[in-house]
Image: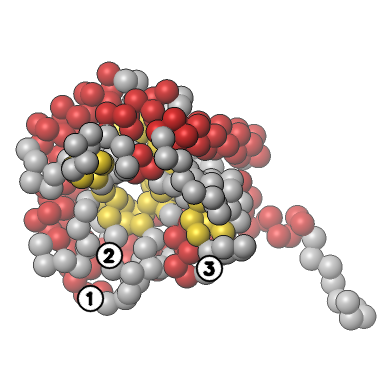
């Protein structure tokens, strides 16, 4: 250290996080800890829902496809499925004690048929009582005007269905929270907000999600929970297994007064093979829930 250099204290490092929390509503955020069916993609959907329920979750996010007993890969809910089918699947979830809170759009925002396909997903989500349809685009930037044009059309449709379209980090136009907030400012519609994916910020951009979320937390309505490691191997993993500090991640949104899903997209251990049997996925799902419950208790106490 050179003469006259000032030591930066831990309090100074954490001050922006606490300042963000204090700038919010006096009411604590109600974090809804859930698990997507996505980690069970190699097993039938019914087994996924059963495993998530047995792992102690109360909330579930619908993934994309699952491998049936026959070996065929089937969609959780087909893009052209009638809304009533989504309602039926939601009832199956609730019979297991699981409240569905998120689903994927399954089409890029910049796609030619994006408005039509998102409209169908919004109809399905409304029939299922799902609050957030998660969407994103290609991992390389481009078609920015189409993004803004399509989301501006979709915002009022989402509000009419009492559903929110939630864009998430996926490289390209939505590389970071800051980039997502720029899009949201141009769209300027309460029907379109953000689902924060810290793992993708660190993965695709090699950017630290902690300062990033400080610039974008006001637009966050949900989280797709995944962690990430750059060393000793570059790969995504379950929360608490990677390099992201989840206390610092959640503290900026600790006092929004909203219900905010924290839905695990990845629960797996880094460096080792994923479980070949569903019971192994159950164990990892339970561990992820317990980790997030610990973090949420700490964040609430700090806020």
Of callouts 3 and 2, the N-terminal one? 2
Count residues near mark 1 (Cα–Cα under 10 Å), then give few for <14, some for 14-19, many for 20+: some
Mark 1 in CB contact with mark 3 (< 8 angstroms) = no
Q: Position of residue 117 (x, y in %)?
A: 12, 54
Within the image, what quadrant is residue 6 found in?
bottom right
Q: Are marks 2 and 1 in contact (CB under 8 Å)?
A: yes
Q: Position of residue 257 (x, y in %)?
A: 46, 37
**Which of label 2 and label 1 is nearer to you?**
2
Of mark 2 and mark 1, the one earlier in the sequence is 2
Tell me the residue at 25%/46% (across/down).
64
Check residue 137 in the rendering and tell me which mark sits there, or answer none: 2
Residue drawn at point x = 20 percent, y = 58 percent: 107
Please give the count of numbered marks on the rendered protein: 3
Whether tag 3 and tag 2 are in contact, CB under 8 A, the answer is no
Identity of the residue furthest to the bottom in this view? 2
Which secondary structure lies at badge 2?
loop
Q: Residue at x 27, y 34 (%)?
A: 44
Disc 1 on helix, strand or loop? Answer: loop
On screen, residue 108 versus residue 247, left or right, reads left
Looking at the image, residue 77 lies above or below residue 234: above
Category of crowding for the residue at label 3, using alpha-carbon neighbours closer than 10 angstroms: few (below 14), some (14–19), many (at least 20) = some
Please give the residue where the numbered disc 1 appears in the rendered image: 143
User: Residue 200: image x %, image y %?
Assistant: 44, 60
| Vertical relation: 202 (above or below) 123 | below
């Amino acid at each position: 250290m050179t003469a006259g250099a000032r030591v930066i204290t831990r309090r100074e490092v954490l001050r922006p996080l606490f300042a963000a929390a204090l700038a919010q509503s006096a009411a604590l955020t109600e974090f809804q800890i859930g698990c997507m069916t996505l980690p069970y993609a190699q097993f039938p959907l019914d087994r996924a829902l059963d495993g998530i329920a047995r792992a102690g979750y109360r909330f579930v996010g619908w993934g994309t496809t699952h491998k049936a007993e026959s070996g065929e890969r089937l969609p959780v809910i087909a893009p052209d499925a009638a809304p009533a089918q989504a309602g039926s699947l939601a009832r199956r979830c609730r019979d297991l004690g699981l409240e569905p809170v998120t689903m994927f759009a399954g089409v890029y925002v910049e796609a030619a048929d994006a408005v039509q396909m998102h409209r169908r997903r919004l109809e399905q989500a409304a029939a299922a009582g799902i609050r957030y349809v998660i969407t994103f685009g290609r991992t390389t930037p481009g078609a920015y005007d189409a993004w803004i044009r399509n989301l501006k059309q979709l915002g009022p449709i989402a509000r009419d269905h009492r559903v929110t379209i939630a864009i998430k980090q996926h490289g390209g136009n939505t590389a970071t929270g800051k980039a997502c907030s720029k899009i949201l400012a141009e769209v300027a519609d309460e029907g379109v907000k953000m689902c924060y994916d810290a793992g993708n910020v660190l993965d695709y951009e090699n950017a630290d999600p902690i300062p990033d979320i400080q610039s974008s937390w006001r637009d966050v309505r949900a989280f797709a929970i995944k962690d990430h490691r750059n060393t000793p191997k570059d790969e995504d993993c379950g929360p608490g297994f990677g390099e992201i500090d989840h206390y610092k991640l959640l503290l900026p949104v600790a006092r929004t007064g909203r219900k905010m899903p924290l839905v695990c997209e990845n629960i797996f251990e880094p460096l080792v093979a994923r479980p070949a049997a569903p019971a192994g996925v159950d164990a990892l799902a339970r561990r992820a829930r317990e980790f997030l419950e610990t973090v949420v208790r700490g964040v609430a106490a700090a806020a």
